Image (cartoon, rainbow, N blue to C red):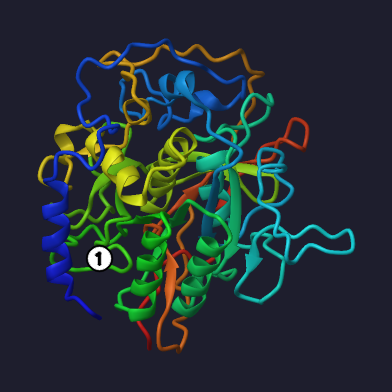
């Protein structure tokens, strides 16, 4: 690589000390206008503590939605395991690939695993991530995403077992940049540095594209044990740790005073899940899309801003949390309201009252995940999930029925070649 990781870290620390990149940036969160919250009518919004919580351990989404709900001109690339094309909260939210759609067949994004247009999710990870970013709002169904209007570009690079090659990830990044994406969500990682991956993210920076990536789920200090692409501290990169509903760093989350930028909700996150369902999952994979969603809202407000301006705005407007002191660069979690220029809900939080629901019995069980066989390949990437995970998956299309199932068929992070 042209520059060592140590030198890039030093440069990034210097960048974060710059007080302003542009006069329009809201680098102070004091004296921001106070607005009332905007609530969606989605029936399971009350289960999305990361968006809105009475304790204010959330991203203050309802206040941000009073200012903006996003723009349909914004394209967000989700480089992951694909998306559930039939989920009612995701239908109509997807970017159409004009080069691949023909003869009455619509193709959404691209499948880099099989080199075709089928991006149907066979793992679940990509669908869950996509719902956090952009599940449809005010449709009286399921959940809601941070950005109500942006289009999602699903780029499938993870196979049915949650693993994939860095070569495909690199190709997907370049595809996203060349096809108009302004934000890329990368909830995956590798133990190995890769020049092509670094260069692809640098290319995204040159084109004004923000790259949001998960910090990793090893519970280690990333200043000492780097994970890629999180260790590539380019100006357009945001590295995201996970917090729990109490505001503490999640037990599985990586951290780093100089290598992890900020945190977001990442424990028991409720979102879309295939087929046509909803589930609770945990991981820094679930934290990263909260930040992606906030960046997407900012792009809708300021489409002319550079990637660096968008990154600095997010970092400068975090909500400080005592549990993150010394654990991340900013010591706070992403705050959608402050990022778009208004005050959040304050220390008492929002007192959202959900509409009455018909009581239903919900069965749950814990899933011990099997070890995923290590693929013999020179470089790999895999989804960032804790070693053990439980998913409560509901099936609303079956009247009166809900059930639970294991979150993953092979969710262990397998990154090192055999």
Is 191 on the left or on the right of 14, as rendered?
right
Dot 1 surroundings within 10 Å: few (below 14), some, or many (20 or more)? many
> What residue lies at 11% left-to-right and 62% top-to-bottom?
10
Q: Position of residue 104 (x, y in %)?
A: 89, 58
Q: How many marks?
A: 1
Q: Depth check: give the residue in front, 92 or 190.
A: 92
Q: Position of residue 382 (x, y in %)?
A: 44, 69
Residue 53 appears anywhere in the view: yes
Q: Position of residue 116 (x, y in %)?
A: 71, 73
Residue 387 appears anywhere in the view: no
Vertical comparison of 310 with 101: above or below: above
Q: Depth check: give the residue in front, 32 or 124.
A: 32
Q: Position of residue 36 (x, y in %)?
A: 42, 10
Furthest residue in direction right, as rendered: 103
Q: Quadrant of residue 63?
A: top left
> What residue lies at 23% left-to-right and 79% top-to-bottom?
2
Q: Quadrant of the C terminus?
A: bottom left
Q: Quadrant of the N terminus?
A: bottom left
Is 115 on the left or on the right of 223, as rendered?
right
Is 337 on the left or on the right of 357, as rendered?
left
> What residue lies at 46% left-to-right and 55% top-to-bottom?
184
Q: Quadrant of residue 185?
A: bottom left
> What residue lies at 46% left-to-right and 41% top-to-bottom?
303
Q: State the SS at label 1.
A: loop
Residue that label 1 marks? 231
Vertical comparison of 110 with 266: above or below: below
Q: Depth check: give the residue in front, 132 or 303.
A: 303
């Amino acid at each position: 690589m042209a520059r060592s990781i140590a030198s890039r870290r030093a440069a990034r620390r210097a960048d974060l000390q710059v007080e302003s990149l542009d006069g329009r940036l809201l680098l102070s969160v004091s004296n921001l206008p106070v607005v009332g919250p905007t609530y969606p009518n989605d029936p399971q919004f009350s289960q999305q503590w990361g968006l809105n919580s009475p304790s204010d351990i959330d991203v203050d989404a309802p206040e941000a939605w009073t200012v903006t709900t996003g723009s349909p001109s914004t394209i967000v690339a989700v480089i992951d395991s694909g998306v559930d094309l039939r989920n009612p909260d995701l239908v109509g939210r997807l970017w159409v690939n004009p080069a691949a759609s023909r003869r009455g067949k619509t193709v959404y994004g691209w499948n880099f695993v099989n080199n075709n247009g089928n991006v149907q999710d066979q793992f679940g990870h990509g669908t869950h991530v996509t719902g956090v970013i952009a599940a449809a709002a005010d449709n009286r169904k399921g959940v809601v995403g941070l950005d109500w209007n942006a289009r999602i570009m699903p780029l499938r690079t993870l196979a049915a077992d949650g693993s994939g090659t860095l070569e495909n990830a690199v190709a997907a990044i370049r595809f996203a940049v060349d096809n108009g994406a302004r934000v890329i969500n990368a909830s995956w990682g590798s133990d190995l540095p890769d020049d092509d991956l670094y260069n692809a993210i640098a290319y995204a920076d040159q084109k004004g594209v923000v790259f949001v990536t998960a910090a990793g789920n090893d519970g280690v200090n990333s200043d000492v044990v780097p994970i890629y692409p999180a260790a590539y501290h380019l100006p357009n990169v945001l590295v995201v740790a996970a917090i729990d509903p109490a505001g503490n760093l999640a037990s599985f989350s990586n951290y780093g005073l100089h290598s992890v930028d900020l945190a977001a909700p990442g424990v028991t996150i409720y979102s879309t899940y295939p087929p046509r369902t909803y589930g609770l999952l945990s991981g820094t994979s679930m934290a990263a899309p909260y930040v992606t969603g906030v960046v997407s809202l900012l792009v809708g407000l300021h489409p002319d801003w550079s990637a660096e301006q968008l990154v600095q705005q997010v970092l400068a407007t975090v909500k400080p949390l005592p549990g993150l002191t010394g654990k991340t660069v900013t010591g706070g979690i992403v705050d959608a309201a402050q990022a778009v220029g208004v005050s959040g809900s304050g220390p008492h939080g929002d007192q959202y009252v959900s509409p009455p629901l018909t009581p239903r019995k919900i069965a749950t069980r814990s899933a011990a995940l099997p070890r995923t066989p290590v693929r013999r390949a020179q470089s790999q990437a895999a989804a960032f999930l804790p070693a053990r995970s439980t998913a409560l998956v509901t099936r609303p299309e079956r009247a009166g029925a809900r059930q639970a199932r294991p979150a993953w068929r092979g969710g262990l992070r397998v990154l090192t070649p055999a």
